Image: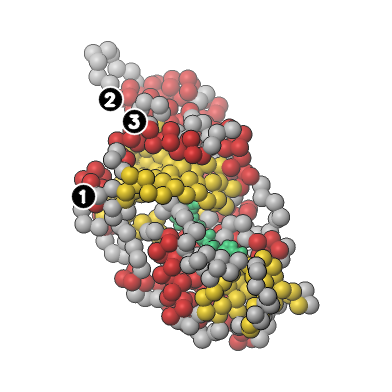
Amino acid sequence: MNREFQVIVVGAGPAGSSAALTMARAGLDVALVERGTFPGEKNMFGGVLHRLPSLEEIFPDFWDRAPLERHIVKKGVTFMTGDSSFNTIIEAGAFDRTPYNGYTIFRPRFDRWLAEEAVRAGATLITQATVDDVVLKQGKVAGVKIVGRAGELRAPVVVAADGVLSFIAKKAGLRQPVFDPGQIAVGVKALLDMPREVVDERFGLVRDQGFANEFVGCTGGVRGGGFLYTNYDSLSIGLVFHLGSLRTSGKTPYDLLNDFLEQPQVAKMVHGGRLMEYSAHLIPEGGYKMVPELVGDGLLVTGDAAALCNATGLNLEGINLASQSGVLAGKAVIAAHEAGDFSKQGLETYRQLMNDSYVMKDLKLYSKAPHMLHNDRIYNEYPELVCTLMEYIYRIDGAPKENLTKLFLKSAVQKVGLGNLAADAFSAWRAL
Ligand SMILES: Cc1cc2nc3c(=O)[nH]c(=O)nc-3n(C[C@H](O)[C@H](O)[C@H](O)COP(=O)(O)OP(=O)(O)OC[C@H]3O[C@@H](n4cnc5c(N)ncnc54)[C@H](O)[C@@H]3O)c2cc1C
């Protein structure tokens, strides 16, 4: 099978389908190549989908048509120790008005729908097609080869949207061949079936409202955190670990997830939920310093393939960045077709658009966050400090009270040490 297109997109995740949709709407002959039986089949995330400014521009009724679950009106953080927890919750009126700040979604449904929209716009979707090589012509990427299929797909430009392990970016020499485990995280998730009225009642939700909660201090000493998101009639709950720390611990994600689900504070939330699905996936969490060369001769790299994930410890943003980069890559390819120049220089528009977008600006702003998060105290001593302090504050037992500042300093010395506290505060100030 030898076929010629104007552009080939590898990977029909949010980055690839956003790119394909953008280019197909502009009239380009686009191939969207996906290894799954259908787009989204193998894709998972936490997860909350946030606003997608560039896609909304070319697809104004996006939020009316996309297959969404609940919109997030409540966001919480829970600091946990073995037997105590302290919760902070923001329930913002602004989050309960359109345009909503975020929605829970299911990737198999969402990714499939977005790829179908690209097809409706004119893209050719080729599924069950794993790309295992790039075609080079005079040193420029000029197509791809698909496992087990004779011939090749040819195009003057290829968009790599093949996710965190991007074979294409590696093959073209745009990213390092081996990852630093300090820059990669692994996420594990359980999907628990739960009647809609139980979800509403348990988490204090009405209509289509949703709740998103993060957990710190729940990963058995491994650097990482937990998450819980409400869908209409199920809960997505899981843990994310720094790969290096997980490897050193010798623990398995599966055992840690089971321990998490059995902790009393979490057990109450998931009680009665029936396990429907268990999944795991890698996350590029190295931030700005991990972003590879975005442009090569005949090649653009988008989404997780370009490590465009913003993990600050407060939020995990990936799909919005992936979609934004896909749209911008699409715009750069359209411009390159108009100019008839697919060299690295001809595709430079992509880098410029990216540098001007919130994607690179945010990654740059939080470029020190990944380093800050490699601090074991965040996952062990600080949750204990927070819980201990709150317990002192709320304990009324007839004993004379202590001055709060003195109490804080005493607990900080005991749990963390004043030197560490000062160093960590400085590091957080620089990172956030
Ligand atoms: C546990 C977890 C929680 C997360 N939570 C959130 C969250 O709450 N919010 C958020 O915004 N982000 C979250 N993310 C990050 C988010 O999922 C990613 O950033 C996003 O999916 C990246 O999109 P992408 O299109 O670049 O890559 P992907 O979604 O990985 O898509 C890549 C596509 O390429 C296909 N592919 C790969 N290799 C080939 C090949 N050789 N040939 C053909 N096809 C190929 C794959 O099948 C896939 O369809 C989370 C991630 C994880 C793992």
* Amino acid type, mark 1: Glu
Q: Which circle's residue, 2 or 3, is located before the other in the chain? A: 3
Q: Does residue 96 sit above or below 59 in this rendering?
A: above
Query: What residue is rendered at 77% in x and 74% in y?
Result: 139
**Given the current orientation, which residue lies at the most extreme right position?**
138
> Would you say the residues marked 2 and 3 are in contact, meaning their CB atoms lie under 8 Å apart?
no
- Dot 3 lies on which element? helix
Q: Residue at x 48, y 45 (%)?
A: 188
Q: Where, quadrant-wise, is the N terminus in this rendering?
A: bottom right
Mark 2 and mark 3: Cα distance apart in space: 20 Å
Q: Residue at x 43, y 36 (%)?
A: 258
Task: Count neighbours of disc 3 (C-alpha within 10 A) and say few if under 14, some if 14 to 19, many if 20 or more.
Answer: some
Which residue is the site of mark 3?
264
- Relative to residue 253, is residue 272 drawn left or right? left
Q: Identify the residue position indicated by label 2 in the image.
A: 394
Specify few, some or many for label 2: CA neighbours under 10 Å numbering under 14, 14-19, or 20 or more. Answer: few
Secondary structure found at label 1: helix
Return the residue nearer the eye: 135 or 102.
Answer: 135
The mark found on residue 197 in the picture is 1
User: Mark 2 CB in 8 Å range of ligand 1?
Assistant: no
Q: Earlier in the sequence, mark 2 or mark 1?
A: 1
Which of the 4 quarters of the picture holds residue 297? bottom right
Q: What amino acid is labelled 3 in the image? A: Pro
Query: CA gap, disc 2 to disc 1?
Result: 33 Å
